[in-house]
Image (cartoon, grey):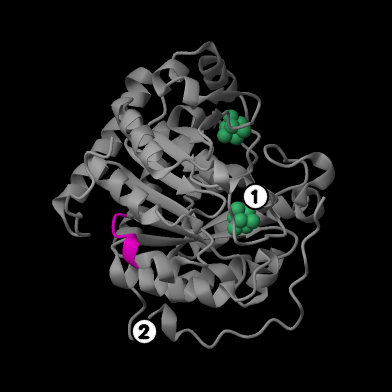
Amino acid sequence: MGALAGESRESPTDPGRRSRFQAAFLSMLKSRLWTHRPFFLAHAVTFGCNSRCLTCSYWKLTPRMKEDLPTSEVYRMLDEAYEAGMRGYYLFGGEPLVRKDVGELVDYAQRRGFVTTMNTNGSLLAARAPSLRGLDFAFVSLDYFTAYNDVIRGRRGTFGEVLRGIERLRQVTGAKVTLVTTISRLNFDAIEPMARFAEELGVSISFNSIEPTLDFGLTDSEASPNFDFGLTPLQLHQFYETLLRLKREGYPLLETERVLQDFVNGRTWKCEFPKMFVYVSPDQKIYSCDYRYGYDLRHGSFEEYFSSRAFQDHVRTSERCNRCVRTCVRGYSYTYEFRLQHMLGLAEGALRLYRQRPRSGGSVGSHPPVPTPPFEVPTPRVS
Ligand code: SF4
Ligand code: SF4
């Protein structure tokens, strides 16, 4: 633990980056052909969040930040995950950048040999960017192409912060940026404009959706933001159809045409997600993706968990579960199964991501001035 502290950082162009990517690919191959165990550690690094999104209730857990795993314990967990064969480290929260040591965590993971990915609301990105040189991929949430984003996010000024943060990140790191837009009834008109916006910024984009019948995890049905703002089945269908059209028109969507086409046609699929990702909470508990059971990593190990009946049952039953409406979960599953048409689409998206540059003659910072929302940011409901 901590043995790597103080070693020099890998530069964005270092061949070490290529070897980490190759190792991650091999770990997926090994899982697919042999172990059927996760190779990506998805770590909610904090209970804290500095936003109050209308479509999320996670921010209510912020008082539990004192339970976040200390730096040295995260290092220990990364060591153990590496020994267990994992080669991807995905940081999220809450909002991961509220942790002051987030750059150290990313650095440690990178030097240990993980491909590093972060999901962030972008509000602290400009300030933290210099510490994120070890980051490979940044998924930055943006739910609207104007400051109306701040209304959905429940935090004034986020729209400008995100634009400045992306610019700064691309100035000082080699991280590839993807916007993540969550579509709900609050921004159903934003699908096409957001695709255009991403293209103008020279970044990729991925879309999520929420729908009222899908609610599990850290919310309860009475207080569900999904219930208030989720898409109807008809809207969900229109959502997939619009994404498919935009993909075919050449917008920089990460979703592949195969995935979108199958959503539009209502095709069932085999979920491979639990064989790919293991989710660890800020207080080191493993939860199944449907939150049906948990496992306390503080009194066990990844090895023990992967050998447990609970994990193996979960993997088996998941193959028949089609609960997720998120395009990414189906996409991961198709990748795991090496579906040819999907893999070709994925390669094209990866190439686009790899070649990512700010648009010619400008940068995200040259985007027109951020307009002021025409209304007050409402205080989100507290159940
Ligand atoms: S969606 Fe993300 S940024 Fe928004 S409240 Fe939830 S955790 Fe925070
Ligand atoms: S489809 Fe089911 S098994 Fe797969 S990630 Fe979603 S909830 Fe989990």
Picture layout, residue 268 above or below residue 10: above
- Quadrant field for ligand 2: top right
Query: Which residues fall within the magenta stretch?
Result: 130-134
What residue sits 19% from the left and 43% below the top? 19
Left or right, 213 with reference to 306: right
Asked where in the image residue 370 lies, by quadrant, the reply is bottom right
Task: Tell whether 369 sits left or right of 16.
Answer: right
Name the quarter where the N terminus is drawn: top left
Q: Residue under circle 1? A: 63
Q: Residues within 10 Å of mark 1 (few under 14, many from 20)?
A: few
**Residue linked to disc 2:** 362
Image spot of residue 35 (x, y percent): 36, 19
Q: In the picture shown, does residue 344 fall above or below 97? A: above
Q: Are marks 2 and 1 in contact (CB under 8 Å)?
A: no
Whole-percent x, y for residue 323 in the image: 66, 34
Q: Is residue 59 visible?
A: yes
On whether residue 26 falls in the magenta region, the answer is no
Q: Residue at x 44, y 19 (%)?
A: 306
Given residues 156 and 115, the one toward you in this image is 156
Q: Nearer the viewer, mark 2 or mark 1?
A: 1
Q: Amino acid at mark 1?
A: Pro
User: Does the rendering let one see residue 36?
Assistant: no
**Can you tell me whether the CB of the residue at mark 1 lies under 8 Å from the nearest atom of ligand 1?**
no
Query: In the figure, is residue 88 to the left or right of 143?
Result: left
Q: Quadrant of residue 84?
A: top left
Three-letter residue code for mark 2: Gly
Between residue 112 and residue 201, name the one nearer to us: 112
The kind of secondary structure element at disc 1 is helix
Residue beneath the point at 34% across and 28% down:
80
